[in-house]
Amino acid sequence: MPKFKLTDEQYAIIKWAVGLVMPGLGTLFAVIGKTLNWPFTEDVLTIWTAFTAFLGLILGVSSYQYNKEE
C-alpha cells in the first residue's frame, strides 16, 4: 500500500477542518434545521457526526503512526 505524506501545513488545515469547522457546521445545520422544521434534520446530522468522527479517527491513527516512526 502506498504511503501518502502530508506536509505540516496540510495536516494542520485538515485537523482544523475536522476538529472545528465540521462540528461547527453540524451544529449550525442542526439549529437551523430544527428551527425551520426541515425534514430529515436528525438523519443528516447523525450521518454528518459519524463522518466527522470517522475523519477524526483517521487523523488520530495517522498522527499515531507518524509519531511512532520518529
Image (cartoon, rainbow, N blue to C red):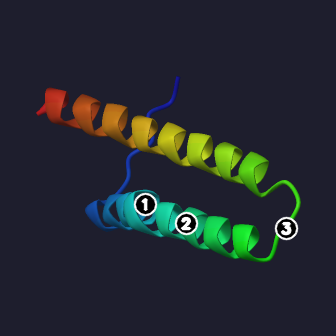
Q: Residue 67 at what x, y percent from top left?
A: 16, 35
Q: Decide which of tag 1 and tag 2 comes sooner along the chain.
A: 1
Q: Is mark 3 on a helix, strand or loop?
A: loop
Task: Return the residue at label 3.
Answer: 38
Q: Image quadrant of residue 34?
A: bottom right
> Of the residues tagged 1 and 2, which is closer to the observer?
2
Q: Which amino acid does label 1 sit on?
A: Ile
Placement of 34 over or under 4, stated as above or below? below
Residue that appears at 35% across and 58% down: 11
Mark 1–mark 2 Cα distance, whole angstroms, equals 19 Å
Q: Residue at the location (38% across, 42% down)?
A: 59
Residue 27 is labelled as: 2
Residue nearest the observer in this picture, 56 or 61: 56
Position of residue 37 in the picture relative to residue 2 (left or right): right
Q: Which of 13 and 1 is in front in this view?
A: 13
Front residue (pair 69, 42): 42
Q: Of helix, strand and loop, which one carries label 1?
A: helix
Q: Say which quadrant the C terminus sits in.
A: top left
Q: Closer to the N terminus: mark 2 or mark 3?
A: 2
Comes first in the chain, label 3 or label 1:
1
Q: Residue 14 carries which label?
A: 1
Q: Measured from the top left, where is residue 60 in percent x and y?
A: 32, 38
Q: Where is residue 15 in the image (x, y as percent from the top left)?
A: 36, 58
Give the mark toward the camera: 2 or 3.
3
Three-letter code for the amino acid on which mark 2 is drawn: Thr
- The residues tagged by marks 2 and 3 sit, at their Cα atoms, a distance apart of 14 Å
SS type, badge 2: helix
* Residue at position x 66%, y 44% in the image: 46
Amino acid on which the number 3 mark rests in the picture = Trp
